[in-house]
Image (spheres, grey):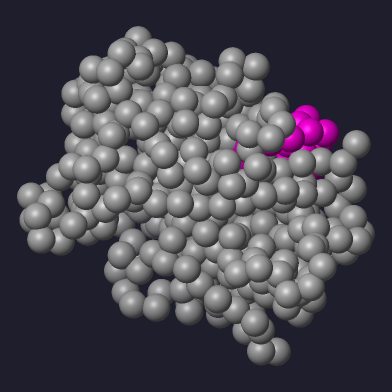
Amino acid sequence: MAPTGPARDVAIVAFAQSDHRRRTDELSEVELLMPVLHQVLDATGLRTSDIGFTCSGSSDYLAGRAFSFTMALDGVGAWPPISESHVEMDGAWALYEAWVKILTGEADTALVYGYGKSSPGEVRDVLTRQLDPYYVAPLWPDSVALAALQAQAVIDAGDGDEAELASIAGRNRASAAANPHAQVRGSRPQGDYVVRPLRTGDCPPVGDGAAAVILAAGERARELCARPAWIRGMDHRIEAHSLGVRDLTDSPSARLAAERAGAFERPVDTAELHAPFTSQEIVLRKALRLGDDVTVNPSGGAPAANPMMAAGLIRLGEAAARIHRGESDRALAHATSGPCLQQNLVAVLEGES
């Protein structure tokens, strides 16, 4: 959808996230989300009634009931009546919808959030339901088994080896030592094989979490944030559904999304990649043309915390937060969904000098 009037500058002006934990049995999804919403609103001084548009990302499969997002809306506050939407996707895609809404001039501010609790069930099995229902899903290949196929393809192609996978895991979790919200921090052994060639350290932790951001346009963004993270471009693309027709060592959809977002026009200094498995970072680095001069996942990335339906939004939030703090001038943020990097979203964020 193209803007109906003059182009607008839109920025992420605030970001908040929960402390990601393996289990939050004592909390409902609403109770998990509420402190995050209060924190992100408090950062700007806005009230719910000041928000022009609200959009969320979550999954009924994880919640185990239909229209589960309506319970979270009770926590957000739906009175007075609000302009609201929901995507059955990671919150990064909710951010995309909100961005378009502001670009068209239908809102000046937006609240975006994503949340998920993976602890109640077996998330590896739950994710099987995204596969082709006729030929693949009945075989029950879980998410780790499919990621292992991709990892082995990367190794067979000569793009990496198990030592490099271990190095990626160690670097991400060492970076997470400075992240108070991370579920897994610091260096640790790679552990035993889960599905060869992936060891425990190559796989993301299973846990619960939530995240939220606030978007604002133009001067309103400057009023709400000392150094807004301007969204200079954003795009998302998808690979073929069938794994058998894809080259798992490459991600053309991520490359195309980055190109359309303007990522290749000028160098970035930071990249927050949603690469739950270490081998996927190798694929994404190649597709997104990230050199050794780019700081990748200073937050620790998905290997440190991977709350379903929020991890992609967190990548955008973490990249924006570095710009807010003056630690980055131009950052790339990436989110993925589906098996083996099937769907990819890329955003380019910039700070003002």
Q: Which residues are magenta?
A: 321-333
Task: Name the residue: 44% across, 61% down.
Answer: 89
Q: Residue furthest top?
A: 163
Please tell me in which quadrant of the rendered image residue 178 appears.
top right
Task: Name the residue: 71% across, 31% down.
Answer: 266
Q: Is residue 159 above or below residue 253?
A: above
Q: Is residue 127 above or below residue 38?
A: above
Image position, residue 280 (x, y; %): 39, 31
* Residue 243 located left or right of residue 68: left
* Residue 187 located left or right of residue 352: left
> Which one is nearer the viewer's eye here, 315 or 338?
338
* Residue 181 located left or right of residue 340: right
> Which one is nearer the viewer's eye here, 265 or 66?
265
Task: Name the residue: 43% across, 44% down.
Answer: 253
Image position, residue 325 (x, y; %): 81, 37
* Magenta residue check for 329: yes
Task: Name the residue: 63% across, 23% down.
Answer: 295
